[in-house]
Image (tube, rainbow, N blue to C red):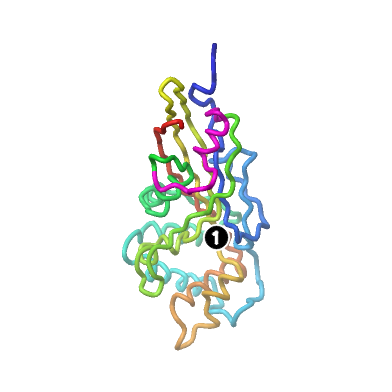
Amino acid sequence: MLNLNFCKLLRPKLVAFAQDSYLDTTAEFIDSEALPSCVAPIFGPDLNYGLRRKIPYGSGVGATEAELKSKILQLVNIFASDANTDLTSDLFNSFLKKNNEVKVFSDQRLNTLASNHQNIKSFCNRALSAPEHPPITAGQKRIHQALKNANWSIENINVPINLGVPAFNNGTPFLRSGDYGNGLGLMINGIQYVYVFSTSYNYFPDIEKYIINLDYYFYDVFGLDDDDLLEFGAKGDGLFSRADSVGITAWWQLQHQFGYAPLVTRCKVSRSYEVTAI
């Protein structure tokens, strides 16, 4: 007799989901390389791009693509001077290729940084919330609790969907410390979506344990909307304008006035857990 509850999964199964609660969802994005067709994040206006839009704040910081490109690249020097300069430059250069459609940016270096980041480590364990793998999210149903409620049958779980999203936001922007000096606060900062898939699951009733392998996919948009411009941009490139604010405005102009499509950043982190089934 074959009992699939006790065997390796025949396909990855979605077991948890997180979405930025402040996200104004307007545009669906398909990532067929990593996600099944039934799963598609819906991003906000930062996924939009176009030509000759009137700037909603100030008068802009340049009139040509070449001029704006030089100013946006100053952001790399400002926010990635401590570490990951090459990776941050590669991401910006991918944007500056002027793609005619939104594409995914993924890189093993980014996966490694995410896997080792304290906020991501905490999120991964909290998504499971098994007592022997702290930290846990007390009082909330997470993967472990969903499995228990399904009598340890992964095919029958109710997928937890109320997880809070993590962020690469350690440090201080003004001091360019932590993630604001190593590029992560510039490349990603706040995550917009997380999808957690189980790639294998083995439950051992005789010893009341299970082993689960999880793949976490973290998504964000490498692009700007009007709110980003209003909060972080510069009205112009004058004597008292800050270089980082000028760079943000140059970014917005390239995206919304010159048709530079944003990118969707994807990080993948894998974890394996052995858990007592109680």
| 163 relative to 85 in the view: left or right | right
* Predominant SS of the magenta segment: loop
Q: Which residue lies furthest to the left in this view?
A: 82
Residue displayed at 46% across by 43% down: 129
Residue displayed at 56% across by 66% down: 224
Quadrant of the rendered structure where residue 254 is? Answer: bottom right
Residue 93 appears in view? no
Quadrant of the rendered structure where residue 213 is? Answer: top left
Q: Does the magenta stretch include residue 153?
A: yes
Q: Position of residue 53 (x, y in %)?
A: 66, 72
Q: Which amino acid does label 1 sit on?
A: Lys
Q: Is residue 262 magenta?
A: no
Residue segment shown in magenta: 134-154
Comparing 117 with 276, the one in front is 276
Q: Residues within 10 Å of mark 1 (few under 14, many from 20)?
A: some
Comparing 271 with 211, the one in front is 211
Comparing 31 with 69, the one in front is 31
Q: Position of residue 79 (x, y in %)?
A: 39, 68
Q: Is residue 47 above or below residue 233?
A: above
Which residue lies under the disc numbered 1? 98
| 84 relative to 153 in the view: left or right | left
What element does badge 1 sit on?
loop
